[in-house]
Image (spheres, rainbow, N blue to C red):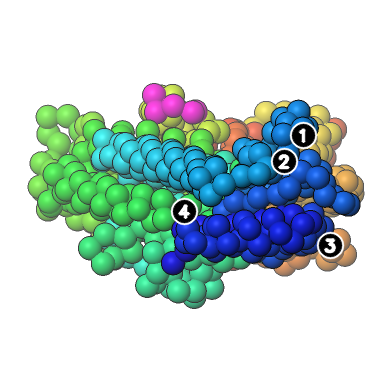
Amino acid sequence: MSKARILAVDDQRYFRELIEGLLDDEGYDVQTTASGEEALHLLERQDFDVVITDLVMPGIDGVELVRRIRERLPEQPVVMVTGVVDVNTAVDAMKQGATDYILKPFDRAALTGSIDRILQQCRLRDEHARLIEENLEFMGVLSLMERAHGLFSTLSVEPLAERIVEGLCLETQAESGVLWVAEDPGRGKLERVGARGLVRIAQEPESVELAEVQAAWCPGISTARSVLAKMPEDVSGGEALYLPIRAGGMTLGILRLSGKLDREYFDPSDRALAEKFCEFAGVAMHNAMRFRALERRSLRDPETRAYSQAYFEDAVRNEIQKANRFGHRFSIIRVDIEGWTGEDAPDANDREVVEAARRVEGALRATDVLATGDEGAFLLLLPQTDALGAGVLSQRIRTAFAALWEGTEAPAARIASTTFPVDGTQLESLQTVLDDRIEQTGTSLLALRPEWRRSQAIDPMFDCMLELGTIEPVEAEGQIMRFVLEDVVRRPADRGVLFLSPGVRWLPDVLEVLHEMQGHYCRSEIILLAEGEERESNPHVTWVSKSGLDSRRPFLVYFGDGPAYAMVGQLKLAAARAAIFQSSDRALVEFLAFELGRELEIVLSI
């Protein structure tokens, strides 16, 4: 094997053969050319350790050749060969980038000594660069280890998920990251728990099936440590790096990194760092999941399966963080059962209490949290649930209680709910609203008129309400209907249900407002009772032309996010002023909304 590859450039054949002979005897692989142009062509196709060039040559001389070589190959060593009278010119060549020069006539020692010095300098330079690279790599690994070890400082799943995404984005210089994690190890459904950077949260699914991710998003991830794949079209274009979070052979989550701050793709070093980081992340996530399961068991009553209030409050605070990060809403329900407070309250292990708790749990979803609060109350945390959804679950609980105490004198149950962020943005403010609403249910018209709950007909109930109304100008009915309809449009982010019966006298006004609503975004559903009228197409309006209700009576009931409200007007008018019933009694309005849904066969969903 040769000691180095040398390119000799000289227009005189004698010197080319002299240099080739001297260096060949020393073990070098030598190639020669007769001009600067030919040397440049060779350097485009081959690599040489040292270039030796004569200074004075026709065409491209030595100085120009050095300049051009330096433009293309800045690190290429070049030795200039010149006569004694050309020393000043050789110095100028050194300024252009020549590494060394030797004088003609030269001997073997001068030539080989110059090349040996240059090769030694190159070896030192390469060794220095290698050491720097190793040091940088070591510092990168050290940073990775420190960041990865930091994952073990928390045993809470949600904060840990945020740290994992943040750490991987920093290590790989990714612009964005999203993490989906299973509720428990081994589950196939993954919930979005972490996001960072340039992420359009609204376009990211809140939950995904692991099998779907493996099949559609990143095929091969079930066996690979990372996969590069196209991002979903509904999110954005480009390539993403998918990484599994694994522990003990189980996939606990899937993380997606996208975008690069310094380039367009993730290179092998990015993938290697990310894969190593995910090894630590998998262990940390598995520990957090095991701790959560242990905490749940230790803070959960074995009989009722309800959590303690301390655990519940901690869960609400975590939910507030998630809701703020992802723009979710969530609700809390409180259930107070008459006679289950004070000194005579039944024990938590009492058969009736246990059965009631299990009936409540049976009405909930898998993601909902049931806990016992002060004075025997049940507390429910409903993630990603608005006020209307909380109302649906409240009705399920009432139905479950009715079945539990069927045929016996059932204790009265007071149920109230509050929603983040509509009713408050902190645990304390939400609890205050919830306590106030529980108190209000005790003074509600529905509590004072318990026969209304047992009534199977709504029209007679409306007649009873009108007896409690106030005498107002008839025009107030139309003004109220217009205001409430317009208010629905003014609060497009709020979801609710509005039952509206304008009667004959206010139908033109209502149709006018609905026409003005065309093209406006609205999350609330409007149920319009307008018998025999032509239906104007509106995606937010459900028209009911036939029902058991008297369509001549103007009324409206709104329940959902924001203030609850009900208004009932007269069937027939005999004067310019008439009785109008109005109420913001939330318990009563909620009852009316779900009774109207039952009467009109309108399914209200969570």
Q: Distance between the residues labelled 1 and 3?
A: 95 Å
Which of the two discs, 1 and 4, sits closer to the camera?
1
Identify which amino acid the numbered label 4 is placed on. Answer: Ser
Looking at the image, tell me whether mark 1 or mark 3 is earlier in sequence order: 1
Q: In this view, does 561 lie above or below 535?
A: above
Residue density around tag 2, few if under 14, some if 14–19, many if 20 or more, within 10 Å: many
Image check: 82 left or right of 326? Answer: right
Image check: 411 left or right of 319? Answer: left
Looking at the image, tell me whether mark 4 or mark 3 is earlier in sequence order: 4
Q: Name the residue under label 3.
A: 537
Q: Name the residue under label 2.
A: 82
- Seen from the viewer's position, the closer of residues 373 and 37 is 37
Q: How far apart are marks 3 and 2 (CA)?
A: 94 Å
Q: Name the residue under label 1.
A: 86
Pointer 3 and pointer 2: residues touching (CB < 8 Å)? no
The region drawn magenta spans 424-428
- Seen from the viewer's position, the closer of residues 526 and 44 is 44
- Seen from the viewer's position, the closer of residues 100 and 578 is 100
**Tag 2 secondary structure:** strand
Residue 269 disc label: 4
Image check: 287 left or right of 20? Answer: left
Identify which amino acid the numbered label 1 is placed on. Answer: Asp
> Within the magenta stretch, is there residue 172?
no
Q: How far apart are marks 2 and 1 (CA)?
A: 6 Å
Which of the two discs, 1 and 3, sits closer to the camera?
1
